[in-house]
Image (cartoon, rainbow, N blue to C red):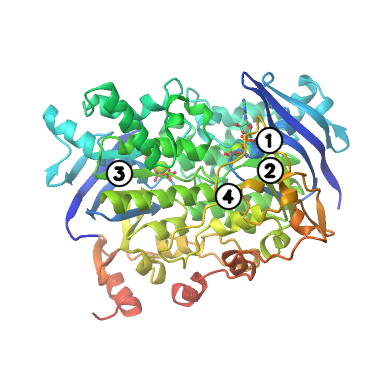
Amino acid sequence: MEKLLEVKNMHVSFDTYGGEVKAVRGVNFDVNKGETLAIVGESGSGKSVTTKALMQLIPQPPGRIKEGEILFEGRDLAKMNEKQMQKIRGKEISMIFQDPMTSLNPTMKVGNQIMEGLIKHQKMSKAQARKRVSELLELVGIPDAENRINQYPHQFSGGMRQRVVVAIALACNPKLLIADEPTTALDVTIQAQILELMKDIQKKTDSATIFITHDLGVVANVADRVAVMYAGKIVEIGTVDDIFYNPQHPYTWGLLGSMPSLDSEDEELYAIPGSPPDLLNPPKGDAFAARNEYAMKIDFEQEPPMFKVSDTHYAATWLLHENAPKIEPPEAVKKRMEGNANGSSSSEGERI
Amino acid sequence: MSQEKLVEIKNLKQHFKTGRHSVVKAVDGLNFNIYKGETFGLVGESGCGKSTTGRTIIRLYDATDGEVIFDGENVHGKKSREQLKKFNREMQMIFQDPYASLNPRMKVADIIAEGMDIHGLEKDAKGRESRVHELLETVGLNKEHANRYPHEFSGGQRQRIGIARALAVDPSFIIADEPISALDVSIQAQVVNLLKKLQEEKNLTYLFIAHDLSMVKYISDRIGVMYFGKMVELADADELYKHPIHPYTQSLLSAIPLPDPDYERTRERFTYDPNNHDTSEEPEFREVRPGHYVLCTTKEFEQYQREHGTGK
Ligand SMILES: Nc1ncnc2c1ncn2[C@@H]1O[C@H](COP(=O)(O)OP(=O)(O)OP(=O)(O)O)[C@@H](O)[C@H]1O
Ligand SMILES: Nc1ncnc2c1ncn2[C@@H]1O[C@H](COP(=O)(O)OP(=O)(O)OP(=O)(O)O)[C@@H](O)[C@H]1O
Ligand SMILES: [Mg+2]
Ligand SMILES: [Mg+2]
C-alpha cells in the first residue's frame, strides 16, 4: 500500500483571551492511496480542526499549527506558503465542510458557485463548465438540474444544499477528499446514493478519503480504517473490524453503546456521563479518566501510550497494560461486537 | 398518549413560486392528526417538504391552502392579536442548527427569557432570573451558564439552550426539526432522554422531524413517511418498522446504515421507482391494517391487503 498522507505529531492551538486552547494535542496517522479513513469522536474533540489544519485552513490568528509534519506525497504541507497551498486546495485535496449552509454563498446562484472551481482549476470554458455542472448535479441526485442551477441556496432544502457542496468537492477529481459530515442532512436513501457515488469515484480514480461522521452506521459502511478521537488525541485506531468487533478503549465502548438499535425498547439510552474536558487546561493523565468507570489510579497521573493490539490496531488506554486487570466491555457493546446487525434483519423476508 | 386531537392538519398545501412559470409544490395536500401527549415522527426524502410542513404549522409561512387546527382553533387566516399571542406561546420550535439559531451577541439568560419577556410572563427581574435558573437546571445546565455567550458552549449544550428557550413560555406543542442531527451519538442520547423526560413531566406533544431512523423509531409513537410533498404511509412506530407497505418506506428502511461492518458489506438496498405505481386513478390514503394507512389506488389497496392485511 502506498502512503498518500502521513501526519506526524501534529499540535494545533488557539490563542484566546482565556489562554491557549489546545485543540489538537499530538495526532499521528497515515492515509493510503485508495482507502477511506473515518474519524469519529466527541463534539469538540478536534476532528474538524485536525482536517482543516491539513489544508492550512485554520484561521491564523487565533489558530496555529504548533508542531508536526503533514507529508502529502512526501511534501510537507505544514511548511508551504499560501501560494503553494492554493495550488493544492480544491485540486489535489478538496474538502466538504461540515456546515453546508455557511460554505455556500447566499447571494450567488448555485450553478455559478460550482462553475467557479471548474473554470479556475480545470481551465474549462464557461460552456464546458456549465455542461459539467449539470452532470454533477444529476450525479448527486438533484433532478431538473437545468433549472436548479439558476436558483439561490435558500431555495434548496437542507439536504439539497449539502449535495451541492458534495458536487463542488468532487468536481476536480482530487487525490484526497476530506469530507466533514457530508451526509448528516440527508435521508438514508439519498445518503446511500451519495456514499455509493463517492466510493465509485474513489475506485475509478484511486483517490483517498478522510470521512468525519457521527453516524457509526455510515462508518461501518464506508471505512477501511477508523480513528477515534477524544480531547484532541487519537485514542484508538484500527481497521473497521478492529474498532467494531474488538474495541479496546472505554471511550470507544461509550460511543458504540450510545446508539439505539432498531430493537431498543423504551429504556433510557446510554449516554457517557460527565462533560468533555476543558482544552484550556487539559487534565493530567488520561483525559477520559474522570468519565471512565474503569479508570485506575494511574489514569489520573500518567498519560497512557499507544498500546499495540495487533499490526493494524492500537489504543491508548492503561487497561491494555500487562499489569491491568482484565475488564469486559459493557453488555450493550458486547452485543454489538457480536455483529448483531440487530432486529431489523428478522423482518427482511417480509420486507422485500 | 390520549385519543384527543391536539393538532389537525387538513389538506395542507404550501406552494412556492420559483420563477414566472414554475412552482414548487413543497407540501401538497397533507392530512394527519397529532394527539395530545404523543410524539409524531416525520421522515422522508430530503426535499420532500418536512421542514416546510413544520414551518407552515407554526405559521412561519402562510399556507397556500388547507387548515391547521390547534386545540380546536384554526391557526391560519385572520387572527386577533390575542389569538396570535396564544398560538405563539403554545407552539414552539427547536431548530436543526444549534449554531445558527442562537443570537451570538445575546447572553444565554436573555436568549432563554426572550419569549417570557414578549409574553410578559415574569413581572419582575427576580422572578425572571429564578425562572431562567430553573429552566437551565431542567435541561441539565446550571445557573453559572446564564451569563455566558453561545460560542462558549458545545453543540450539545447549545441545543439544550434552544430547548430551554422553547420551554420558557410553557408550550404544549413543540416542533423539533432535526434537533439532534448535528450532535455526536452520546450527546444525541442525552438530548433524546431529556426530551422524553420533559414529555412525561409536562405532558408535551412533539412533532419530531429527523433522518436518523433508529432514533425516530425510538422516540416516536407514530410515524408519517413523506414523499414529494405527500404523506405516503402512516402507522405506529413498531408497526411501520415491522410491516412497511409503501415501496418508498421499504426502500427507506432497507437503506438504514447499521453499525456492523459485516452487515454493511452484504447489505442489499431496495430502490424505489415511482414509475411502478398503478396510474389508473388518483391514489388515496387508505387503511390497510388497523391504524396503518398507505397512499394507494384501489388496485394497489387490494394488493396490499392480500400481502399485508390482517383481515381484521
Ligand atoms: N476559532 C477558535 N477559537 C477557539 N477555539 C476553537 C476555535 N475553533 C475551534 N476551537 C476549539 O477546538 C476544539 C476542537 O474543535 P473541532 O471543531 O475540531 O471539534 P469537532 O471534533 O469537529 O466537533 P464536532 O463534532 O462538534 O464538529 C473545540 O474545543 C473548539 O472549541
Ligand atoms: N423559500 C423557498 N423558496 C422556494 N422553494 C423552497 C423554499 N423553501 C423550500 N423550498 C423547496 O421546497 C421543497 C421542500 O423543502 P423542505 O425544506 O421542506 O424539505 P425537507 O423535507 O425539510 O428536506 P431536508 O430533509 O433536505 O431538510 C424543496 O424542493 C425546496 O427546494
Ligand atoms: Mg467538526
Ligand atoms: Mg428540512
User: Looking at the picture, how far across and down is residue A212, in whole percent?
Assistant: 64, 45
Residue type (three-letter) at the residue carrying disc 2:
Ala
Pointers 4 and 1 in contact (CB under 8 A)?
Answer: no
Q: Nearer the viewer, mark 4 or mark 1?
A: 1
Q: Give the residue number, with chain letter if any, for mark 1.
A: A282
Q: Give the residue number, with chain letter if any, for mark 2.
A: A287
Residue type (three-letter) at the residue carrying disc 3:
Ile
Same-chain check, marks 4 and 2: yes
Q: Is residue B236 left or right of residue A128?
A: left
At mark 3, the secondary structure is: strand
Q: Give the residue number, with chain letter if any, for mark 3.
A: B174
At mark 4, the secondary structure is: helix
Residue at horizontal 29 percent and vertical 51 percent from the top: B201
Give the Cα distance between marks 4 and 2.
36 Å
Near mark 4 (Cα within 10 A), the count class, few <14, some 14-19 or many ≥20, is many
Q: Nearer the viewer, mark 2 or mark 3?
A: 2
What subunit carries mark 3?
Answer: B
Pointers 2 and 1 in contact (CB under 8 A)?
Answer: yes
4 or 1: tag closer to the N-terminus:
4
Same-chain check, marks 4 and 1: yes
Same-chain check, marks 2 and 3: no
What subunit carries mark 1?
Answer: A
Give the Cα distance between marks 1 and 3.
38 Å
User: Looking at the picture, how far across and down is residue A306, in whole percent?
Assistant: 80, 50
Give the Cα distance between marks 2 and 1.
7 Å
Q: Which mark is residue A220?
A: none
